[in-house]
Amino acid sequence: MNRSAKGALAAGAAVVVLLGGAGSYALWSDSGASTPGNLSTGQLKLTAQGAAAWKDVSADGIIGGTTINPATDLLVPKDTWEYTTTYNALATGKNMKAQVTVNPGTAGTLPEGVTVTPTATVDGASATTGTAVTITPGAARTVVVKVTVAFADVTGQTSQNAAVNVSNLSVSLNQVRP
């Protein structure tokens, strides 16, 4: 190849390189920054408050006051005893709604004539087990749980010296989507 051909080839290659490089820098571009910040998660908390207690709420025939000591007092036919425990429910976060669930904690078979019924209220309003209640974020709500043990009017030797085990009571507060 002669010198002028080599020179022309080199000049052509230089033009291609310059045009290729110049083309990529000729397009405009810009960028911006955004600062979305940090996010935090909320909380749903159930905390026991005060001392739970048993009370005799029988319709009649109460002897020795209404306070019950389950270690020494014995349930008899036509008795109705009520266990009451109180919790604070606290929620933080948007779109908070929760379900109160009460498991009365009965173990084994209940004696004939004995029924166990759990109920709950949130700030005095009924919160039937499995029903969603609105929990206002940031405001503590009072959840009162009662378990009523009623012994029907049985006769003869029915259900004497029998255990009524409700020692596994549990209360749950679970978030649900509104």
Image (tube, rainbow, N blue to C red):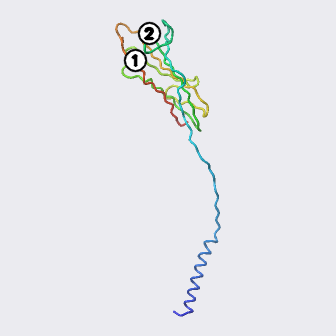
Q: Residue 42 location in percent, x, y?
A: 57, 39
Using a 10 Å C-alpha cutoff, classify the residue at mark 2 as few (fewer than 14 neighbours), some (14 to 19) or many (20 or more).
some
Q: Residue 47 location in percent, x, y?
A: 53, 29
Q: In the depicted view, which residue is nearer to us: 30 or 40?
A: 40
In the rendered view, tell whether residue 70 sits above or below residue 15. Answer: above
Dot 1 or dot 2, earlier in sequence: 2
Secondary structure state at the residue bearing disc 1: loop
Q: Toward which corner of the image does residue 9 lie, by quadrant?
A: bottom right
Of labels 1 and 2, the one closer to you: 1
Amino acid on which the number 1 mark rests in the picture: Val
Tell me the residue at 57%/89% (across/down): 7
Please give the label number shown on residue 164.
1
Q: In the depicted view, which residue is nearer to us: 114 or 74?
A: 74
Q: Residue 32 location in percent, x, y?
A: 64, 58
Amino acid on which the number 2 mark rests in the picture: Lys
- Check contact, mark 1 vs mark 2: CB within 8 A: no
Q: Toward which corner of the image does residue 5 lie, by quadrant?
A: bottom right
Q: In the depicted view, which residue is nearer to us: 76 or 158?
A: 76
Q: In the depicted view, which residue is nearer to us: 124 or 62?
A: 62
Q: Which residue has dot 2 on it?
A: 78
